[in-house]
Image: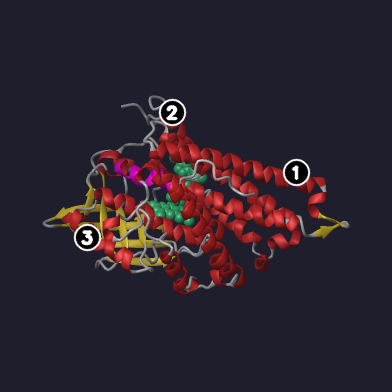
């Protein structure tokens, strides 16, 4: 199912073509020939450095980094739409690799807005200069993720990770879990409670924490069901001191995180679409070559109908993704709603697409060396990332009806 170039700029067309070539010539052959590699239990050994170096060579590792620091700057009027095009292409090759790379883009967008100039001068060149350098964004805690997005703006729902000012430093104590790139990132953005007396929208601050800061420990690398080339990690902060200038946003960090989350959800849905496209393309090829009952599979009408269903779902995701990405680029009042809609819609539709792919491949669909089950596993992860399905729906209705659905349902004061 070729994507139509309707409305793409020259910049977007070129970016997509070079990504597609990288995926078709490097990523897909690597994954097919090394299907066991994602199961290596040594996280450092899973993805060879040459893959990130290849991504670096075509300029897709440092999107979002200002050009003055050597990054690949995109046309700001269509930046998020271009992120979506590139994220989809990479995830068509491998969703975990896409996860790894897009964290760099999303956190760079946040840093270029909130980090002090001298910190940008220190960290952006590090990111640009080292193809293995990764960024991470740490919100989720053992007892708190979903609640952060509900209207519970009350002290008891606040983050458990605390940061306290001590002279010229902030001292962070707490734990973060399920963090993308958490195992191997060189620089992290960490959210912590800095005022336990107020609601989390007023009492949460964000900090820049370099990986080698004393008091920061990587407790483990999570072994995930899918997207396994991204090393998801757990982090512990014990009297972890960062200089005062490493404070990014004081008090209102959750509100400021919108600059990360709006493009983030578009990118999330775009990666998800890439997984769906890979499932469709491989299934379309299979059903037109594999013979059962004396005919290629597609001649059996039940098979043909399933393929049509896959294509229709993917087209619907693409259409919503296009509108949502445009809304973010244009700063539309409906951008938040559309971002949540496309993130949740993509996760459920593509999961169904991956299910069709697995079923249409019959027994081959569940064999590890065949590779289709990997797309099903990768698709399952999207239901959980960047908020669960139910919480995403809650966020949609909360932003549509702030006075009713968006108000705390606890006892009235
Ligand atoms: C692969 C992966 C990568 C991730 N990367 C990051 C990252 O980079 N940074 C980061 O900060 N986080 C990250 N996360 C965490 C992710 O955002 C959370 O997993 C997600 O928000 C859900 O939180 P939870 O796992 O604590 O689930 P829980 O909050 O424990 O939810 C469990 C279930 O209960 C439901 N539920 C919970 N509370 C309510 C409620 N009040 N009302 C109704 N239903 C409720 C949920 O919908 C869900 O079905 C990642 C997760 C995954 C799987």
Q: Is residue 64 magenta?
A: no
- Dot 3 falls on a residue whose secondary structure is helix
Residue topped by disc 2: 400
- Dot 1 falls on a residue whose secondary structure is helix
Mark 3 nearby-residue class (10 Å; few <14, some 14–19, many ≥20): few
Residue topped by disc 1: 305
Instruction: Estimate the spatial distance between the alpha carbons at disc 1 and disc 2, rounded to whole Å.
Output: 36 Å
Q: Is residue 318 above or below residue 212?
A: above
Q: Is residue 109 left or right of residue 278?
A: left
Residue situated in front as seen by the camera: 162 or 249 = 249
Q: Residue at x 55, y 49 (%)?
A: 273
Residue situated in front as seen by the camera: 252 or 173 = 252
Whichever of callouts 2 and 3 sits on the residue coming sooner in the sequence is: 3
Q: Is residue 33 left or right of residue 249?
A: right
Q: Is residue 192 left or right of residue 183?
A: left
Mark 2 nearby-residue class (10 Å; few <14, some 14–19, many ≥20): some
Residue topped by disc 3: 121
Whole-percent x and y of residue 335? 41, 35
What's the magenta region?
A: 256-265
Instruction: Estimate the spatial distance between the alpha carbons at disc 1 and disc 3, rounded to whole Å.
Output: 55 Å
């Amino acid at each position: 199912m070729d994507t139509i170039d309707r409305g793409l700029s020259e910049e977007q067309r070129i970016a997509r073509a070079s990504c597609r070539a990288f995926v078709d010539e490097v990523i897909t052959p690597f994954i097919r020939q090394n299907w066991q590699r994602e199961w290596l239990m040594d996280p450092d050994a899973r993805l060879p450095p040459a893959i990130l170096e290849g991504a670096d060579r075509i300029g897709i590792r440092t999107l979002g980094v200002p050009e003055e620091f050597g990054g690949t700057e995109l046309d700001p009027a269509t930046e998020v739409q271009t992120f979506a095009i590139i994220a989809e292409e990479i995830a068509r090759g491998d969703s975990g690799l896409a996860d790894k790379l897009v964290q760099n883009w999303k956190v760079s967008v946040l840093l270029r807005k909130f980090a002090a100039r001298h910190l940008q001068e220190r960290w952006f060149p590090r990111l640009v200069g080292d193809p293995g350098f990764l960024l991470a964004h740490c919100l989720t805690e053992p007892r708190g993720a979903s609640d952060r997005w509900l209207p519970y703006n009350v002290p008891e729902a606040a983050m458990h990770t605390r940061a306290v000012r001590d002279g010229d430093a902030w001292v962070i104590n707490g734990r973060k879990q399920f963090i993308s790139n958490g195992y191997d990132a060189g620089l992290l953005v960490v959210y912590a409670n800095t005022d336990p007396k107020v609601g989390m929208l007023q009492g949460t601050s964000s900090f820049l924490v370099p990986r080698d800061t004393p008091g920061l420990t990587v407790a483990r690398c999570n072994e995930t069901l899918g997207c396994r080339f991204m090393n998801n990690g757990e982090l512990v902060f014990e009297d972890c001191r960062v200089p005062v200038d490493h404070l990014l946003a004081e008090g209102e960090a959750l509100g400021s995180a919108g600059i990360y989350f709006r493009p983030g959800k578009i990118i999330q849905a775009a990666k998800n679409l890439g997984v769906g496209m890979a499932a469709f393309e491989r299934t379309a090829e299979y059903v037109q070559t594999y013979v059962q009952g004396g005919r290629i599979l597609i001649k059996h009408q039940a098979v043909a109908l399933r393929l049509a269903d896959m294509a229709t779902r993917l087209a619907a995701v693409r259409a919503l993704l296009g509108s949502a990405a445009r809304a973010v680029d244009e700063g539309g009042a409906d951008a938040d709603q559309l971002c949540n809609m496309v993130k949740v819609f993509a996760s459920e539709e593509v999961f169904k697409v991956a299910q069709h792919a697995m079923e249409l491949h019959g027994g081959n669909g569940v064999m590890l060396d065949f590779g289709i089950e990997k797309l099903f596993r990768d698709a399952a992860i999207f239901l959980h990332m960047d908020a669960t399905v139910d919480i995403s729906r809650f966020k949609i209705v909360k932003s549509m009806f702030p006075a009713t659905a968006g108000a705390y349902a606890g006892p009235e004061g």
